[in-house]
Structures are given as C-alpha cells and as structure tokens.
Image (cartoon, rainbow, N blue to C red):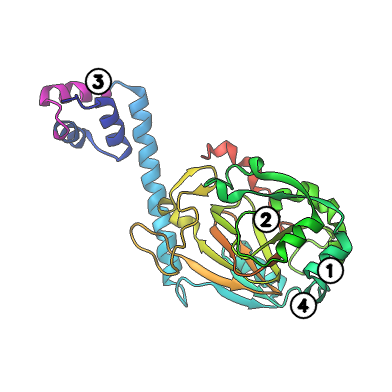
Amino acid sequence: MSQPDKRTLLAEGLAAGDDDTALHARLVGAGVSAAAAKYEIDRLGKDPMAAMLRRQTARMVKQGWLLANHERLACEAEGGFALDTLDRPDAGHFYRHYYEVNRPAKLTGIIDHWPALTRWSLDHFAGVAGGAVVEAQVERERSPDYELAKDEHRRLVRFGELIDWLRKDEASNDVYLTAYNSGTNAAALGPLWDDLGPIDLLDGARTRDGFFWLGPKGTLTPWHHDLTNNLLVQVIGRKRVRMAPPWAFDRMKNRRHCFSDWANDALPAGPGDADTPPILEAIIGPGEAIFLPVGWWHQVEALDLSASMSFTSFRRSNAHVEDYASYGAL
C-alpha cells in the first residue's frame, strides 16, 4: 500500500483553512501515524510558504463572505434576482443604475433608426461586400476548446462563399465570424457600417466602431466573462443569452483565463444551488440588445441565422483589461 503524500495533504488542508488540530486529523485520517503527523505540523510552523498560504486562505474566506453578501443583496432586491428590460433608456439612468453598478439589462428601442434593420440580409451582404476576403473561425466542432484556441481556427475566406454556405440554413457551430476576427473584417466589411447609426448610450465621437458577428443557427459561444463592458446588439435572427453574476465565481469552475469549465452546458435559468450558479436568461431578436457588464459570465447561442454587432465604446473608461494580468488572473 502506497504511503500518502503528506505535503499534498498539508497543502490541501492549508488551502481549506485547517488549523493545526484539523491538519493533524487530516493526516491521521489518510493513514499517517500520529507521531509523523505531529512532526510534519511542527515543521510547518517554521515554513514561511505555509504562513503565506494561511494568510492568503484567510483573505479568500473574507472575499467569499463579501461575495455572499452581494448575492444576498441581489436576491433581496425589489423584484429579486432578475433581468430588467429597458425601452429607449435615458443615458443618465442607464449609467447610474446599470453601468456603474455592474448590472446587466435587456435593451429595446436603441437602434430603431438603423437602416440595417431593414437592409441587412444575405443578399445585401453579397451585394455590398461579397468579393471581400474576410477572416472567420472555422472547424470549431473538431475542438472542445475552440474558444480558448481561437488562433488555430482562423481562416481567410471570400465573403461570398461564406454567404453561399449560410444560404443552406443548416444548424452548425463550425463557422462563425466573430469579434476576434475584426482586425481583418472591419476594413473588409466597411460598407456594412454605412447601415448603422449612433447609439445614444455610447460615445458619439467613435462613429465607425463595433464588432461584426455572423453565423448560422447553432453557433455557440461557451461560458466565459469578458474583460470589458459590452453591448451586444441583434440585427438578424435571435440569440439566447445566459448570464451568471461575478459573485457566483466559486460555482463557475474557472480554471483557465476567462473561461468556465461549464463550457457549452445549458445551465438552467433560476437561483442555482450549492453547486450551480444563479442564471439569468434572455432571448434577443432584431433591434434588441443586451448590456453585459465586465466580469459577468455569459453564454450566447444563435437560435437562427444571426447577424449582430457588439460595442465597447461607452462614455466611461472601459479599460479593465489593462490591469487584468497584474491581479495574477488565471
């Protein structure tokens, strides 16, 4: 019978907040003799790394208490934990009660003036930019980590060929033009920006901003959180957006960067439980939008052939990504 790894047991105990008595019980329970357990814990008292881990664990416990209070307050709010719908929202109200307090919302009536709502179609795309070469994410279905490995799925294709493929109207998660491809596509698809207009909630000085998304029914962006505040605007088709709050971090299974191990799981809308996070869910159709605050987990699924725009050009500083690494983020 193999001997238990005492250092691993001690590390697990320290990370769990065990005091010396609990650490001793953990070791003995795993088959370590009482004398050997006492020896290891005595050594631990002189180990600066163990002292640092204990301090860090105490900080995490405090952070957990703070997040639990955020959850309690959100659930005790008038209307409970819910997603508001704002029709033609006043910018001042939006910033004070949603943007500045990190609260998502479904928005309607903010792009009623866009020509894109009546112009955009596959025929229109082919007519104004069919000959352009665009970058797309392709062969996503062969990789379970297609979002984490986005660079491996970048391909240049003629926009007209992609449109012909989309005309088949087949459900797929294999090909998708996304915001990640905008470095190439913003110039190639420039004529489509002529079909847009200003959005009162955004910085009016940035007139040809935004990121273009186009894909078939079935495209699925797995659970993740963004490093900026985002406004997702639907122009063609419908998307289902599921969201989980930052204060449910411990239930979001975050191991790598901004992605969740829940991946493509369709977590049900509702309050969640000890293992699953609370989920808000909305479907947005043409002319509707979702405000996705920084740090809010979300999953986005196209229910139809879908064309969308997303924006980060708010009237407030949105540079949260710049200090992301300084916090030792995963």
Q: Which residues are magenta?
A: 29-44
Mark 4 touching mark 1, by CB under 8 A? no
Q: Which mark is residue 124?
A: 1
Q: Is residue 282 left or right of residue 74?
A: right
Q: Amino acid at mark 4?
A: Asp
Q: Which residue corresponds to mark 2? A: 176
On the image, the x and y values in percent for residue 265 come to 46, 58
Tally the marks.
Answer: 4
Lower sequence index among marks 4 and 1: 4
Task: Nearest to the eye among marks 3 and 2: give it.
Answer: 2
* Residue 197 appears in the figure: no
Task: Nearest to the eye among marks 2 and 4: give it.
Answer: 2
Q: Amino acid at mark 3?
A: Arg
Position of residue 324 relative to residue 296, above or below, is above
Mark 2 touching mark 4, by CB under 8 A? no
On the image, the x and y values in percent for residue 165 come to 72, 60
Q: Which mark is residue 43?
A: 3
**Residue nearest the observer in this picture, 55 or 3:** 3
Determine crowd level at label 1: few under 14, some 14-19, many 20+ residues with C-alpha closer than 10 A: few
On the image, the x and y values in percent for residue 168 come to 69, 66
Q: Which residue corresponds to mark 4? A: 112
Task: Nearest to the eye among marks 4 and 3: give it.
Answer: 4
Determine crowd level at label 2: few under 14, some 14-19, many 20+ residues with C-alpha closer than 10 A: many
Mark 3 touching mark 2, by CB under 8 A? no
